[in-house]
Each structure stands twice: as C-alpha cells, then as structure tokens.
Amino acid sequence: MSSPERIEPRAAAIRLADEWNIPYPVAEQIVKGVLLGGQCYVRGRRWIGEPLRDISKEIAAAQAQESGIPGSGMIPWGFTDVEMDWRGLIEHGRPLVPTAYEHNVVAAEARAADMPTLKSNDELRAVEFLAPRLQENPTIKRDDARKMLGTKFPTLGKRGFVERVWPNARVRAGLRAVAPPGPKSKQNPRP
C-alpha cells in the first residue's frame, strides 16, 4: 500500500476546487467541514516546538469552538505545520458537496475514472437512483436496471443508459464499470 499523500489545507482547497471544478469558497467550506468532522487524518503541531503528531481530534474541537466566530480561518489558532490526508479529504468531503455542484463532481469523478461524462441532469439523477440499489444488490442485471429506470426516467435513452448511466452507477456503487464476464455468483451459495 502506498504512503498517504499529505497536503496543507489551503492547498487542498485549491486542488479540490480545480479537480472537482467547483468554486474555491465551496472547496474551502468542504475542507473546513472535513476538519470539523475529525475523521480525516490530520498531522501537525499544537504549539511551535512540539513534534509532528496526529491532531485530528484536537483540530476538530478547536474548529468547532471557532466556527461561530466571523472571519475565523481554515486552520484554528495555535496549530502549525498542518497537513491532511488527501484521500481522507476526498472520502469525507464527498458527502459535503452542495447539491448545486454535484454534477460537476460526478463529471470530475468520471474523468478521473476514465468514465464517460454524463450528458444531462436526468442521467445524473438516474445514476444517483441506481447506485444505492447496486450497492444493496451488486448482481442486478443491466436490462433489469434499465427497466427499473424506464418508468422513473422516461426520457433516458438506451444509448445514454448503456454508455454513461450504467457504468457511472456501478463505479459510484463501488463496483467495476463493467462486470467481469461469466455467470454471476449467488449471494448465498449452497454448501
């Protein structure tokens, strides 16, 4: 397993804004939200001179205290050399994306996964509808999924479904874009 990629929070907000094609203030709020959550690994110093260490919980508590103060910064007062885990930021920041920018982030994820970009809001909504169902039951067949979406998204074309919605929904559900060939294994095989 590769070592974690650590990044300073302000640089993380700039990179997030660029990679997800969202405004910097939105990216900054996502980074603040992740710091406030205390789930992402954050390394730094509480005071100058102390060794670098995990300050995830401390910075979350300090962020919570300062959150009501107008003009409070991204990094609470007294912390130095703060770096956060990039992958942790992506994982914990993804649910914090405002609905208005969801399409941008989905398109960015598709580009990163070398997936086709969704062409409409209907396709985006279809992916959002289908992905949780694929997480619950990864053996859903493509034709069954298409029928499921047919009544809810009547303007969704077959080509859009096959080329964009289906693979994006599978990736969003944590599966490979294309299922491996061959018969699918049963959920509860007999001994």
Image (cartoon, grey):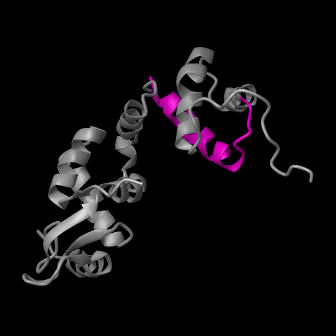
Pinpoint residue 27: horizontal percent, then vertical percent: 25, 51
Please say whether residue 29 is one of the residues in the magenta stretch.
no
Residue 174, picture quadrant: top right
Q: Is residue 11 left or right of residue 119?
A: left
| Quadrant the C terminus occupies | bottom right
Q: In the displayed image of the protein, which residue is found farthest to the front?
A: 1
Q: Is residue 176 left or right of residue 98?
A: right
Pick the residue in front: 97 or 42. Answer: 42
- Residue that appears at 22% across and 56% down: 28
Q: Is residue 26 above or below residue 109?
A: below
Q: Is residue 129 above or below residue 98?
A: above
| Quadrant the N terminus occupies | bottom left
Pick the residue in front: 138 or 120. Answer: 138
Say whether residue 142 is visible: yes
- Residue that appears at 22% across and 40% down: 18
Q: Is residue 118 above or below residue 140?
A: above
Q: Main secondary structure of the magenta part?
A: helix
Say whether residue 156 is visible: no
Pinpoint residue 23: horizontal percent, then vertical percent: 21, 44
Q: In the displayed image of the protein, which residue is found farthest to the right?
A: 191
Please say whether residue 132 is one of the residues in the magenta stretch.
yes
Pinpoint residue 44: horizontal percent, then vertical percent: 19, 73
Which segment did they paint magenta? 118-141
Residue 50, picture quadrant: bottom left
Q: Is residue 30 above or below residue 137?
A: below
- Residue that appears at 19% across and 60% down: 9
- Residue that appears at 75% across and 30% down: 144
